[in-house]
Image (tube, coloured by chain):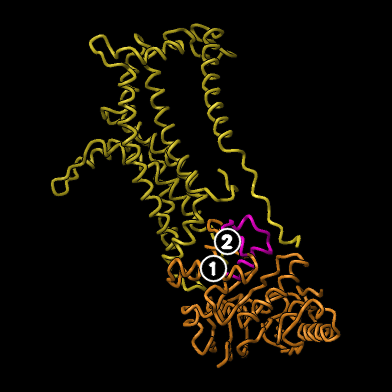
Amino acid sequence: MSAVEVLGVDKIFNAGKTGQVDALVGIDLTVEPGEFVSLIGPSGCGKSTLLRLIANLTEPSSGGITVNGKSAKQSRLDQDYGMAFQQAGLFEWRTVARNVELPLELKGWDRSKRRARAREMLELVKLPDFADHMPWQLSGGMQQRIAIARALAAHPPLLLMDEPFGALDEMTREHMQAELLRICAETSTTVIFVTHSIPEAVYLSTRVVVMSPRPGRITDIIDVPLGGARDDDTRETGGFFEKITEVREALRGAEFGTGARGIEDR
Amino acid sequence: MSSDAVLPAPRIARPRLRRARRVLMFVLSMVLVAVLWEGYKWLGPQNGGEVFGWKILPRAKDSIMPHVGDIWSRFGDPINRASDETVLSVVAAGVWFSFRLVLAGFAMGLVAGVALAVLMTRLRVAERAILPYLVISQTVPLIALAPLIATWGGKVEIGGWEWPRWLTASVLGAFLTFFPIAVGTLKGLKSPPPAALELMDSLASPWHRTLFTLRFPAAVPYIVPALKLGAAGAVIGVIVSEISTGLRGGIGRLVTEFGQKATSDPAIVYTAVLGAAVLGLLMAGLIAIADAIFMRNRPKEIES
């Protein structure tokens, strides 16, 4: 059973009116369990919209989406996925531990079980000593790690991430990428990851999905066979640079004549 | 890992020292007012004065501006020759009476304001339909409204329960309370960013769970300043209503009653005025306690 199956999905905003936007047209995408798939493309290519369709935060205009063999809506109701956004979005009135417990509260877990799981998740993101801190006492990178702990607290098989490291500085960002790979390997979580950054997509992914705008569509899917165990040395290998070049060229092709705007080439 | 450095907790002055300083400033400010009062009495014209031909300087003579000491000692004297009740006990009883009406009015206004804000958050149609009327409601003159509510209330009778006269004053207090609370709470309930609301959606949180888990906690920094405005409104509403409907027992009534004695007993007028000020301070104190409870562990960013 596939982790995510997107079949012939269109998403049209303001259909039939002036200002109609073809956000996504004819999207087919299958993600297998354990994969790490990045969605990359310039602004307006619909990568965030695609993520939000899989999350059932918005409905497709046509086509079908299944997550873990269920409808996207049923998967959302069953909390089959966790989600992380560009802003960590921690609740400032809750301690770090109570932020991590949020998904468990909504699942109706009792207090002691929640406490234990929150502790376990904070160990996982290597912040076990910060359970009783308030979010505003932590740095941006730490807050984002708490947000990942929250997204994974209910042990969902799927993690949906919308530019989660976009607001971090480069050093923190590379550190967080390595941490994310470790966490996903330890928890065998499938990930769909929206990003603007080519090196980030290549470093993290088993497959990179290249998208282009007007109308939003998938123009290329590039396998990244760099192996499972990746570390900082991976960033120095020839294979890594080859894949970056391949993704960059795919983006240029997708952007024929319009120029790849909004893509970070670093 | 420099990127993971913990930000230092915001510098918080030692609370005991800060509190002592606040009390000191409060006492100092009262002394300053007394000094200004006496200073004007000393320097100001006895029978008022003109500035550029306009008669704006108040008369400084004892029958208009009694000495601070006289006002102070008047509290300890009997209310009149026939009674052994002191002015202090009469004013204190009036403040206590009015305080309970203010509390009742504040509570009603709080419930109504929050309920309206929740309704307007839930239904955008409701916001467009209700909000203009809320704004208009606040332009109705209180003095006109008080007798109207008293008349309507007098006709209310539900299963043997009759509208007590004090309820008119409380309702008027509620009338001034609910508006700032409704507006502030509405703004607060709508303050969570879209990502926070999407997070709750992604966790399949039903609307009422999101209301209590996200929207209300996020609204607290907006609700607390609204409570301050609402409390001031409740005090004004009750006092004005006491005066305009002639309700006995409260501080509003004492202000008018003592006012009539101004020519023979100028100091007693100011005892009632000070009583009304104390009523305002009591409410301000209650809100300060609520502030301290609800805003603990919060970054102090939003200030009103």
Label 2 chain ID: A
* Residue A17 point in image, percent of width and height: 56, 77
Quarter holding residue B64: top left
Q: Are marks 1 and 2 on the same chain?
A: yes
Give, as a three-letter code, the residue at label 1. Ala
Q: Judging from the image, what secondary structure is the residue with disc 1 in?
A: helix
- Residue for point 83% across, 84% down: A245
Q: Are marks 1 and 2 in contact (CB under 8 Å)?
A: yes
Would you name the residue on which mark 1 appears? A118
Q: Which amino acid, by three-letter code, is at mark 2?
A: Ala
Percent from the top left, x then y, of residue B50? Answer: 55, 11
Q: Residue furthest bottom?
A: A1
Residue range in magenta is A128-149
The x, y position of residue B248, in whole percent, is: 25, 27
Chain with colour yellow in the figure? B
Asked if residue A132 lies in the magenta stretch, the reply is: yes
Which quadrant holds the C terminus of chain B? top right
| Residue drawn 54% across the image and 83% down it | A60
Q: In the image, is residue A250 above or below residue B260? A: below
Looking at the figure, which quarter contains the N terminus of chain B? Answer: bottom right
Our reading of the magenta stretch's main secondary structure is helix
Q: Chain of mark 1?
A: A
Horizontally, residue B256 falls left or right of residue A114, namely: left
| Chain identifier of the orange chain | A
Circle 2 residue: A131
- Mark count: 2
Label whose residue precedes the other's in the sequence (1 or 2) = 1
